[in-house]
Amino acid sequence: MSASPVKSDPAPRLLVRLAAALFLSYMAVALPLAALPVSILHWPGYGNGLAGLAVGIAFFSTILSRNHAGAYADMKGGRPCMRAGLALYVTASMICVLAGLSALPFTIRYAILITGRLLLGVGESLTIVGMLGWGIGLMGHERAGRVLAWTGAAMYGAFAAGGPIGLALYEHGGIATLMAVSALLPLAGLALVHGVPATTPHAGARPPFWRILGTIRWQGMAVALQGVGFAALGAFLPLRFIHAHWSHAGLGLTCFGVAFVAGRVACGHLPDRIGGLKVALFSLMIEAAGQYLLWCAPSPLLAFTGAVLTGAGCSMVYPSLGVEVVRLVPPHMRGTALGGFAAFQDLAYGATGPLAGLLADRFGYDIVFLLGGLCATGAVTIVLALLNAPVAEGTR
């Protein structure tokens, strides 16, 4: 008798489908980021402050909805959570289409835009937490690092592609066309995940959200400190180049983005294989080196090198520490824990811009990267302490 053929594990292929759907759908977040401020600044009486608020308000609602998204994923499952988030992407973008109607007063158009952006932020919480819960349910918690890595690669890949595409759509068709395309892409994402099977939610008692945050506080603080360098580079690297009279100011962001995505794809399996804390420690040291190099770089070539090191270092910190978060909580609390964990990073992104801007106004743009390096060094200290701490019973 011939031996029965060994069936291949379908979970990795399903994870790739989820990641592809997230890449397409996350364009609804990425496409308007660069184009919205350009559009609003052309409205009479609307300046940088109101333009920035229209972009950042989505980030605010994302932070506030992380807890609820995590609870929804834990109780209902990752599949309905992610699908609900993608549906909100579509709805929010269609609302924002109305902001492109020139017949409406600018105050009404702005109010419509703010409403859509707030809804988009809630959709982001549901989509990302749902994808993580769904992916981990398919792959198993022992491969959680790979799920976290692919989720991040899809998100930041969309960010890298979405900016220039969004500006081109705006220039050719205006804000209404841009938002219509932003609504269509999540529909394609919904179609792509349609045949991916659901996973069964885990039952169990639900402790208060603040207790979960206390359990993961050190991992959250480390990822927040890592996020300072990430946010500082995204906001101030082009200005650093312009202030220093260096050419190719946008190329530094490209170097960062390519290194970031390449790190996720190439090293996504390492946290599951050798442990999240070890990978996070090495990654944070690389990020710190990149930030310090950007701080003191005397030439654009060294600044590009610093951007590459920062991207490579930042790449694996979130998934590596996320693996530790997954291991610290019971299965029925993973979505809530990962939502809280992401909120630490969200807060870092939100706080870095204003703080770094004040420092740059007073001391110059290079000081921003010194701040990023010092914060990454602080995260190294936290991870070293976690590596040397005894494992408490009952935390697994």
Image (tube, rainbow, N blue to C red):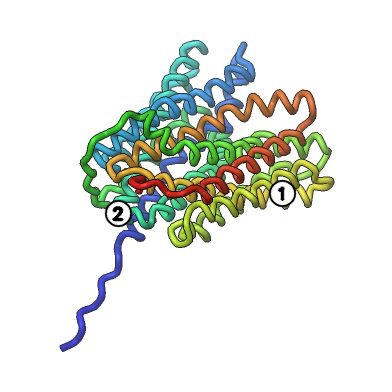
Dot 2: what SS? helix
**What percent of the width, then of the height, locates residue 40?**
58, 21
Q: Is residue 299 left or right of residue 53?
A: right
Q: Which numbered dot is residue 306?
A: 1
Q: Is residue 299 left or right of residue 17?
A: right
**What percent of the width, then of the height, locates residue 87?**
32, 34
Dot 1: what SS? helix
Q: What residue would you read off at disc 2?
A: 138
User: Dot 2, crowdedness within 10 Å: few (<14), some or many (≥20)?
Assistant: many
Q: Earlier in the sequence, mark 1 or mark 2?
A: 2
User: Dot 1, crowdedness within 10 Å: few (<14), some or many (≥20)?
Assistant: many
Residue lying at 60% horizontally and 15% vertically, measured from the top left: 46
Q: Quadrant of residue 382?
A: top right
Is residue 185 depicted above or below 112 in this figure? below
Q: Nearer the viewer, residue 241 or 286?
A: 286
Residue 189 seen: no
Residue lying at 69% horizontally and 35% vertically, measured from the top left: 371
Residue lying at 44% horizontally and 38% vertically, measured from the top left: 216
Disc 1 marks a residue whose amino acid type is Gly
Residue 158 seen: yes
Q: Nearer the viewer, residue 349 or 116?
A: 349
**What percent of the width, then of the height, locates residue 76?**
24, 38
Residue lying at 34% horizontally and 50% vertically, measured from the top left: 135
Disc 2 marks a residue whose amino acid type is Leu
